[in-house]
Image: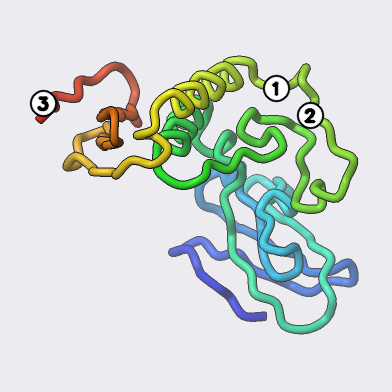
Amino acid sequence: MTKASSPPRQELVPRRTASGIRFTFEGGPDPEGVAVAGTFNSWVGDAAPLVRVGSSTWQATVAAHPGRHHYKKRKGRAWRYVGPRLHLAAAAVLLTLDGVPHLMMGQELNEPRWRDWMSLADDFQLDWDSVDSAAFKHDQALIALRKGHAALRQGDVHFVPRRARLLLYWRNGPQDRILVAVNLGGGTCGAGVSAS
């Protein structure tokens, strides 16, 4: 096995067992939302989450064919890692920057039944009863905003110099100019940017 990357101080230690490869993480902060991804699971982070097996020991066992594998420790879905507040901020960035936004199978709405890329082959339907309604409304509003302003779909992007807790950028289109301000911190904050 070849390690693709190594976190400082805390190691993810692999050991081959009869059932596959067991990865053990000792000590350090609570690695909730952390999983093992590698060539054995098509680099899908949610496929092999670490689970607590002792007071400071976390493990995941993955089925893997004999041979050499590359792996790394991955954080799980954005929702679990950053919480709903920053998850919504990430959606705002996704839907206001250039390029084609990719919304997939309810992940952005915290749909709980998505397992891994193999779900693409399943007869998958969203469980609308478990979708986060606030996130759904947030994404609907952002999509409507994007559809209503060409600058958000085709315009140039000009980032404003970094401000604490605030991501700012202008979207300049043929008919409008929009300042996007995404609050990455707690509480309210002012942009303090002129229209020039």
Q: Quadrant of the C terminus?
A: top left
State the image coordinates of residue 48 (x, y, percent, origin top left).
73, 54
**Taking 66 as reference, is 29 above or below it?**
above
Residue 79: x and y in percent read: 57, 34
- Label 2 vs label 1, nearer the camera: 2
- x and y, in percent, of residue 172 in the image: 27, 37
Q: Is residue 56 left or right of residue 169?
A: right
2 in relation to 98, above or below: below
Q: Which residue is mark 2?
A: 126
The quadrant of the image that shows the N terminus is bottom right
- Locate residue 4 relative to residue 66 in the image: left or right: left
Instruction: Answer whether labels 2 and 1 touch (C-beta < 8 Å).
Output: yes
Inter-mark Cα distance, 3 to 1: 39 Å
Q: Residue type at mark 2: give it.
A: Leu
Which of the 4 image quadrants contains residue 163? top left
- Identify the residue at image location x=47%, y=34%: 95
Q: Which mark is residue 82?
A: none
Q: How is colour applied across the structure in the image?
A: rainbow
Residue receiving disc 1 = 131
User: Would you call the spot at circle 2 few (<14 residues within 10 Å), some (14-19), or many (20 or more)?
Assistant: some
Q: Amino acid at mark 3?
A: Ser
Compare marks 2 and 1 and give the one earlier in the sequence.
Answer: 2
